[in-house]
Image (spheres, rainbow, N blue to C red):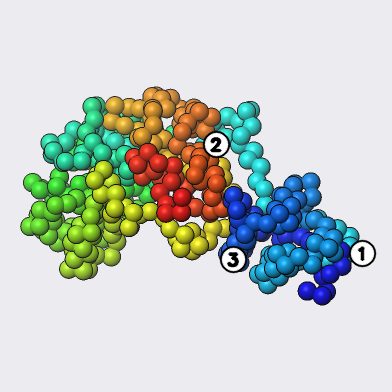
Amino acid sequence: MKDILQECWLYIEPTVFIFKETDKYLFYDSESKKKIVFIKTNTIEKIVNSLLDLDNLYCVLLPNNILEEKDVVYLISQLRQAYMCDIIPTTKTKPVVIPPVMKCHAEKQENKGHELTPLLSEITFYVNGYCDLSCKHCSEYYRQFKSCYKNKGELSFEEIKKVIGRILPMAHKVTLNFNGGNILHYSQINKLFDFLQTIQLKSNIHINYLNLEKEISIPSFQSHIYLHLYITFPLNIELVHYIIYILKKKISNICFIFIVEKESDVENAQNLVTKFKLEQYVFMPFYNKCNKSFFENYVFIDEEDLINERPRKIDVFKRQYINLNNVGKLIISSDGHYFSNLNFPTLGNIDESIAQIINKEWSMGKAWKLTRTQQPCTDCIYQYLCPSPSNYEIVFNKNNLCKLK
């Protein structure tokens, strides 16, 4: 460090984020994906606070007396080795660096819904609410992930077509989901399936395997239409074997969703995956209020998970302003109401324009902007490196599901 024992400028690379905690700092380079944590000392605190002052443009003057302190020597050497910072003598012009701070222009009051419609990425239609099954957790599954659920009403085929017609001008990236009660009891199911064959939007059909017990009446779809088959436990072994066997022969674009509540469910699901050589499948944890230890082992985030998180610069920005699990997604219930998330109040009626609905959610809604701005996340250096809050946080009634705090 002899080369820096004279007064110099310390500047941080523009790809580097600095996150603060009570007693430590995290430097994260969104380009190299490297992370370095430093314990807070009085001197380092002063340096970091100066760096975070936007007026200083990520560059501060370090007097030679500070450069002799061990904690500062360590800070600079570690950051330089990771190519996160550099130092230059004060004889040269002070570097100008633009810190990684994003201005969210969409927050301006004059923005209208039609300017935000490009955010739309997914619409889920609950085409009906009738189902003659009596699944134990029927009233809870849909609050945690996409699932069927009972409700009043049925959407007319014309209403569905009208909504899709409204989004077609922006629909090159919009995904459609179709769910129910039991979607196979939808009175206009054949019209719906025929219509989906004629449009080139990615469309997902969601069905609980128990609803196929009487008859497997799913047609063979084109490549842009996917069947998502939900498999709950305890299994009807004979039925699930028969259904998987038939559907694998009939449909190539199918994904099996195993709703698991405990380790034995995971083992049984894995046995099915192996037995039938399933290629597209998901294990979907379900919180039943009695399996917290299962979630702590398999769902809760620990520090190793966060160390392995490698978000891009744009992803870190997004996590500060929007919820990446919810943003761009709308739901239409079988009784004709829009939601951004079924855990939150309705946004309006199906007769309202999508621009109006999106504007309501952006300005007053709770789902699209649900970020980690509550304790204990606000006191954590991984606050915006951590994935956005999910429905699991909502059903747990906790702001975080991690083992750090």
In the image, residue 268 sits, relative to residue 53, either above or below, namely below
Can see residue 239? Answer: yes
Distance between the alpha carbons at the discs numbered 2 and 3? 34 Å
Numbered disc 3: secondary structure: loop
* Between discs 3 and 1, the one toward the N terminus: 3
Q: Nearer the viewer, residue 76 or 136?
A: 76
* Between discs 2 and 3, the one toward the N terminus: 3
State the mark number for residue 34. Answer: 3
**Residue drawn at 80 percent across, 65 percent down:** 67
Numbered disc 2: secondary structure: helix
Q: Nearer the viewer, residue 117 or 283?
A: 283
| Residue contact at pointers 2 and 3, CB within 8 angstroms | no
Q: Which residue is mark 1?
A: 91
> Within 10 Å of the Cα at label 3, are there few (<14), some (14-19), or many (20+) other Cα atoms?
some
Distance between the alpha carbons at the discs numbered 3 and 1? 31 Å
Mark 1: amino acid: Thr
Numbered disc 1: secondary structure: loop
Mark 3: amino acid: Lys
Residue 253 sits in quarter: bottom left
Q: Which residue is mark 2?
A: 116
